[in-house]
């Protein structure tokens, strides 16, 4: 079942409350309270971060909850997180308290991945794709883009495929221009592509129907 913003907001506020209690327990050297509160904080944070897997852009109205969410999404630790880290270091279990265990990953994998996708769809997607057969050497960076586009297609990430196809076109045209000495490559093997317009580079390497096809592919969405 999709996670609601209300559930995220509730957990964010609970983390805020537990954070304050943990800081108070440390300040007062109240180890009994710390040992009681710390597992609740760790459990709440894991549940909170797990919910974010399903909600990439949650909309939170409560200011306090929003503050917690934004801080954590930007990689900032709460004081409670630093306390958890110190406890992990003292116990020799760095990173284990808040990390997902195998059961967590198995459960989340079933809910978030295998519920809509499996290795069957992945292999079928790759099988549908033809390889790029050429008679000249292909630069390593271009081969990586092509391979990434094939994988994105197999994973049904079609927006990523569109973006990568544009990048492949740009990189291919740039490589042809370098081979024909139409643009200069600097000594550090970098080409200031921003100094050249895509339209001009395309026109320099293609004519007629090929140029039109390249333009149509580049602007397709």
Image: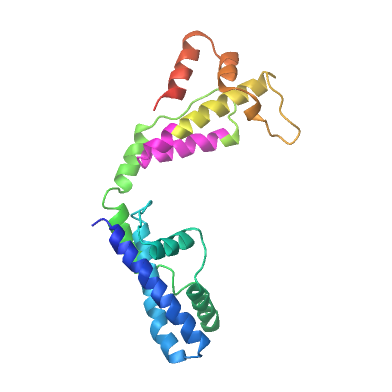
| 24 horizontally vs 55: left or right | right
Q: State the residue at coordinates (34%, 32%).
A: 128
Most foreground residue, 121 or 197: 197
The answer to whether residue 143 is above or below residue 183 is: below
Q: Write down the region rendered in magenta.
A: 142-162
In this view of the protein, which residue sits in the foreground, 103 or 137? Answer: 103
For the C terminus, the image quarter is top left
Q: Position of residue 46 (x, y in %)?
A: 38, 68
Q: Is residue 118 visible?
A: yes
In the depicted view, which residue is nearer to us: 178 or 200?
200
| Identity of the residue furthest to the top in this view | 208
Out of 94 and 39, give the one closest to the viewer: 39
- Is 3 one of the magenta-colored residues? no
- Measured as percent of width and height from the top left, residue 62 is found at 36, 62
Q: With respect to residue 137, does 157 lie above or below? A: below
Q: Quadrant of the N terminus?
A: bottom left
Q: Main secondary structure of the magenta part?
A: helix
> Is residue 154 highlighted in magenta?
yes
Q: Residue at x 35, y 58 (%)?
A: 61
Name the image quarter holding residue 68: bottom left
* Left or right, 139 with reference to 100: right
Left or right of 69, for residue 190: right
Extreme-left residue of the structure: 1
Q: How is the image coloured?
A: rainbow
In x, y percent, where is residue 216? 43, 19
Visible in this render: residue 101? Answer: no
Q: Quadrant of residue 156?
A: top left
Give the left or right position of residue 159, taking residue 186 as reference: left
Residue 50 on image: x %, y %: 36, 62
């Amino acid at each position: 079942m999709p996670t609601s913003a209300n559930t995220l907001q509730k957990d964010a506020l609970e983390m805020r409350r537990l954070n304050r209690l943990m800081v108070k327990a440390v300040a007062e050297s109240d180890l009994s309270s710390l040992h009681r509160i710390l597992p609740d904080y760790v459990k709440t944070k894991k549940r909170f971060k797990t919910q974010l897997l399903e909600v990439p852009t949650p909309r939170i109205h409560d200011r306090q909850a929003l503050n917690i969410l934004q801080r954590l999404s930007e990689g900032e630790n709460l004081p409670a997180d630093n306390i958890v880290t110190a406890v992990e270091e003292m116990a020799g279990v760095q990173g284990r308290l808040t990390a997902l265990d195998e059961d967590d990953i198995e459960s989340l994998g079933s809910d978030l991945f295998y519920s809509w996708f499996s290795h069957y769809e992945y292999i079928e997607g790759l099988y549908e794709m033809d390889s790029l057969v050429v008679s000249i050497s292909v630069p390593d960076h271009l081969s990586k883009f092509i391979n990434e586009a094939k994988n994105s297609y197999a994973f049904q990430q079609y927006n990523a495929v569109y973006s990568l196809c544009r990048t492949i076109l740009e990189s291919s045209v740039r490589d042809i221009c370098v081979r024909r000495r139409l643009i200069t490559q600097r000594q550090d093997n970098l080409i200031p592509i921003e100094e050249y317009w895509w339209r001009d580079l395309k026109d320099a390497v293609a004519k007629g129907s090929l140029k039109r096809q390249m333009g149509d592919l580049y602007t397709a969405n």
